[in-house]
Image: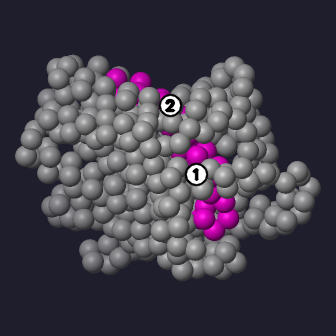
């Protein structure tokens, strides 16, 4: 099994390419907006709020309308989502909006993000299975990390060279390309659900979270990233506390995505299914363990190495994502991936605030280490559920009707 074989799938290739473009464009717009807000107001608080304004509103969008990912054809839903982002970029670039209204617009648009993410997750889960699905998710992680790095680096360059508003225009045009690409090249896939979106979303989320196996898989994908994000949010004050320049913090922030790329490549392409499952809990713990070293204020080179190792630990998600794909109902996959995305963005929006509040009472280095400790503890808690959650899959498969592989014909 190779990446080339997975990329040969037309549906996956279209989703993979457009999602990568959208992530890079989102990151670029976020950097440009944060710079514009800070330049306009001179307020570090408002600048930070602009950087994270898109996280929490996703809770409302995914919680109330997550089922839309199953009720609307993915091609149409994703194209509409990217076109909305395009329009938002144009409005921010040329609208000369007051700061508060700019942030309200970005927050409102963010409510649709879980729906497009849910549609993308549903397409990949429908057209790929088994090791193909693992490699597909591995490629998603690689592309997401690379797109974030490109968006961050490109955002700084674009803002410096073009100014914040023109950089926002660039992000809008990238979203337009993504919308056209997905509309023209993603094959039409059928709607798998029916009914009232609000009622179906509420009942579907409740059903997913009430099931012990699904709930454990979801929480395992929420908690370690939340802890890591809380720690990352403190790297700028950590570097400042050591009397170093902000550029050093930028280098440290790039270390986690680099580690994620390495871990995803190795675990997806080199490690087999059995070993991948055995490495699940150790890798989950690896997300947090290196962060404990920050309590000792190690040399900066070692700080970077610790963050790379923490990023490698995120490869644990490949084993969990495959299991998650298999246990959620086939006619509710869009909503399941929408819920997963919603919670992930929400906890990553809340954890920096909690970490920042703790840093007001404790040394920054100790709070980073505390974030690592919580991640390790979450891995230890999940370890007690591994046999129930990850094991006995054949028994579960035999106890329910076998899913017809209708995706095979669509892959031809």
For the point 72% across and 22% down, the residue is: 195
In the figure, 175 relative to 293: above or below? above
Labelled disc at residue 274: none
Q: Is residue 308 visible?
A: yes
Q: Position of residue 319 (x, y in %)?
A: 64, 66
Left or right: 243 with respect to 370? left
Residue wearing tag 2: 76
Q: Main secondary structure of the magenta part?
A: helix
Assess whether residue 120 is covered by the magenta stretch: yes
Quadrant of res 74: top right
Is residue 345 on the magenta stretch? no
Which sits in the foreground, 136 or 41? Answer: 136
Q: Is residue 244 above or below residue 26?
A: below
Q: Position of residue 217 (x, y in %)?
A: 68, 55
Vertically, is 203 above or below 185?
A: above
The residue range painted magenta reads 105-134
Furthest residue toward left: 161
Badge 1 crowding class, 10 Å Cα cut-off, few under 14, some 14 to 19, many 20 or more, is: many
Residue 124, numbered circle: 1
Q: Is residue 245 left or right of residue 89?
A: left
Tag 1 near tag 2, CB within 8 Å:
no
Residue in the picture at 9% in, 41% down: 162
């Amino acid at each position: 099994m190779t990446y080339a074989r997975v990329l040969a799938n037309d549906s996956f290739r279209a989703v993979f390419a457009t999602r990568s473009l959208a992530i890079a464009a989102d990151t670029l717009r976020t950097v440009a907006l944060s710079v514009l807000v800070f330049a306009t107001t001179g307020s570090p608080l408002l600048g930070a709020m602009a950087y994270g304004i898109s996280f929490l509103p996703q809770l409302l969008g995914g919680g109330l309308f997550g089922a839309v990912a199953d009720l609307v054809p993915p091609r149409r839903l994703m194209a509409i989502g990217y076109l909305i982002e395009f329009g938002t970029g144009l409005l921010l670039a040329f609208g000369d909006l007051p700061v508060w209204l700019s942030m309200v617009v970005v927050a409102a648009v963010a409510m649709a993000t879980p729906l497009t993410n849910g549609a993308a997750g549903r397409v990949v889960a429908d057209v790929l299975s088994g090791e193909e699905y693992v490699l597909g998710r591995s490629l998603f992680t690689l592309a997401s990390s690379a797109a974030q790095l490109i968006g961050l680096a490109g955002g700084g360059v674009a803002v410096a060279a073009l100014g914040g508003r023109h950089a926002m225009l660039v992000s809008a045009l990238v979203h337009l390309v993504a919308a056209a690409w997905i509309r023209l090249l993603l094959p039409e896939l059928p709607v798998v659900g029916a009914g009232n979106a609000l009622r179906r979303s509420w009942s579907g989320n409740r059903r997913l979270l009430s099931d012990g196996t699904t709930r454990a898989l979801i929480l395992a994908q929420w908690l370690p990233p939340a802890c890591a994000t809380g720690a990352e949010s403190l790297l700028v004050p950590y570097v400042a506390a050591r009397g170093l320049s902000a550029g050093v913090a930028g280098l440290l922030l790039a270390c986690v995505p680099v580690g994620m790329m390495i871990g995803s490549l190795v675990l997806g392409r080199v490690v087999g299914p059995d070993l991948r499952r055995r490495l699940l809990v150790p890798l989950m713990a690896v997300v947090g363990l290196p962060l404990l070293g920050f309590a000792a204020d190690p040399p900066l080179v070692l700080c970077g190495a610790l963050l790379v190792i923490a990023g490698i630990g995120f490869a644990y998600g490949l084993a969990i994502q495959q299991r998650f794909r298999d246990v959620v109902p086939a006619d509710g996959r869009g909503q399941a991936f929408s819920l997963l995305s919603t919670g992930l963005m929400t906890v990553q929006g809340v954890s920096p605030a909690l970490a920042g509040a703790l840093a007001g009472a404790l040394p920054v280095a100790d709070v980073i280490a505390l974030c690592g400790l919580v991640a390790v503890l979450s891995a230890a808690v999940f370890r007690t559920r591994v046999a129930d959650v990850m094991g006995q899959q054949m028994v579960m498969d035999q106890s329910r009707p076998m899913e017809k592989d209708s995706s095979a014909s669509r892959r031809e």
